[in-house]
Image (tube, rainbow, N blue to C red):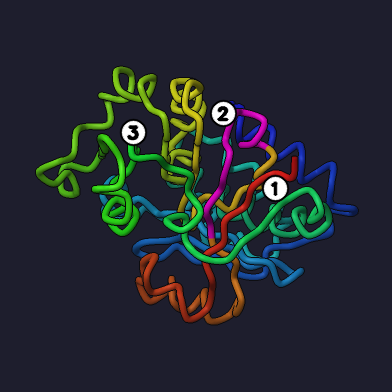
């Protein structure tokens, strides 16, 4: 069984998209840094492919047969505890989420740009970042009382970062929590959000955070920072050629989403 966030997102896209079963995955790619699914609607969903955990990259079950399948069936792979399956499933779920968001667009306040400009922080804040997102960390550092950075990958755990297992201790102390969208496919998102409930601002960020945001807002998230794909075919080529988050910019733009109050 998948996490609560994933189950809610699957339910919401099924409810909101008419004839969701007729939408097919026209293209499925698993790149070095990101997996991507492009739908018959033109929507694209991305998911971090965890190269540090799935090296060498594992072939998804059913490889060679995914393109042409109903997108909702692929999205249900997001429930899997097999990370290689979950990555493809979350990419499909994120693609369907884009279609669902268009239908409910009036429910959101959307601004362009990364979260550094939109995050609500104070000089007195304790900020906890789960996942070392260097550009965001550098934008926040020096503007708050303390910045804790938690990172699972030892290769990315630089001098000021702590292992992510410290989350049980430091997240409850956060005034602001910034959580990587990669916590969705690896099934840590629900626990992290429960630990961060005392925070004034809770942000889930990154290209993997393209899930329908209602599933996050209902759990206390105040802002989602993700990407809006502008050129579907180009972005699929970028991820196929090993592009990371920064390489996506010619084909996508960063946006921030908040619920309308």
Asked whether the beta carbons under mark 3 and mark 2 sit within 8 Å of each other, the answer is: no
Q: Residues within 10 Å of mark 2 (few under 14, many from 20)?
A: many
- Of the image marks 1 and 3, the number of the one nearer the N terminus: 1
Residue occupying the point 69% across, 33% down = 8
- The numbered mark at residue 73 is 1
Tell me where residue 238 sits by quadrant.
Answer: bottom left
Left or right: 13 as drawn, with respect to 242:
right
Most foreground residue, 232 or 81 = 232
| Residue located beneath label 3 in the image | 124
Tell me how far mark 1 sits from mark 2, CA to CA: 17 Å
Left or right: 193 as drawn, with respect to 132:
right
Most foreground residue, 223 or 32 = 223
Instruction: Residue 6 in the image: state x and y as whole percent.
Output: 61, 36
Residue occupying the point 42% across, 42% down = 121
Tell me where residue 129 sits by quadrant.
Answer: top left
Most foreground residue, 45 or 256 = 256
Helix, strand or loop for disc 2: loop
- Of the image marks 1 and 2, the number of the one nearer the N terminus: 2
Quadrant that contains the C terminus: top right
Q: Residues within 10 Å of mark 3 (few under 14, many from 20)?
A: few
Residue 61 painted magenta: no
- Of the image marks 3 and 2, the number of the one nearer the N terminus: 2
Helix, strand or loop for disc 1: helix
Left or right: 67 as drawn, with respect to 82:
right
Instruction: Residue 127 in the image: state x and y as whole percent.
Output: 34, 35
Residue occupying the point 73% across, 51% down = 108
- The numbered mark at residue 3 is 2
| Region in magenta | 215-226
Tell me how far mark 3 sits from mark 2, CA to CA: 33 Å
Instruction: Residue 86 in the image: state x and y as whole percent.
Output: 51, 43
């Amino acid at each position: 069984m998948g996490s609560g966030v994933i189950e809610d997102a699957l339910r919401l896209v099924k409810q909101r998209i008419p004839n969701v079963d007729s939408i097919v995955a026209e293209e499925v790619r698993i790149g070095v840094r990101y997996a991507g699914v492009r739908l018959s609607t033109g929507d694209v969903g991305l998911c971090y492919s965890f190269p540090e955990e799935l090296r060498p990259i594992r072939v998804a079950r059913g490889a060679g047969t995914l393109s042409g399948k109903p997108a909702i069936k692929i999205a249900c792979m997001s429930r899997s505890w097999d990370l290689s399956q979950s990555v493809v499933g979350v990419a499909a779920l994120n693609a369907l989420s884009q279609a669902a968001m268009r239908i409910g667009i009036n429910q959101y306040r959307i601004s362009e740009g990364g979260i550094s400009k939109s995050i609500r922080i104070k000089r007195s804040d304790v900020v906890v970042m789960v996942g070392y997102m260097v550009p965001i960390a550098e934008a926040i550092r020096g503007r708050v009382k303390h910045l804790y950075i938690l990172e699972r990958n030892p290769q990315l755990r630089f001098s000021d970062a702590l292992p992510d297992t410290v989350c049980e201790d430091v997240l409850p102390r956060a005034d602001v929590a910034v959580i990587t969208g990669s916590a969705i496919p690896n099934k840590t998102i629900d626990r992290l959000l429960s630990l961060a409930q005392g925070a004034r601002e809770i942000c889930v960020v990154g290209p993997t955070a393209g899930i329908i945001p209602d599933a996050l807002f209902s759990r206390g998230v105040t802002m989602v920072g993700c990407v809006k794909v502008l050129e579907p075919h180009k972005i699929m080529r970028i991820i196929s050629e090993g592009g990371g988050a920064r390489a996506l910019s010619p084909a996508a733009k960063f946006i921030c989403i908040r619920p309308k109050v």
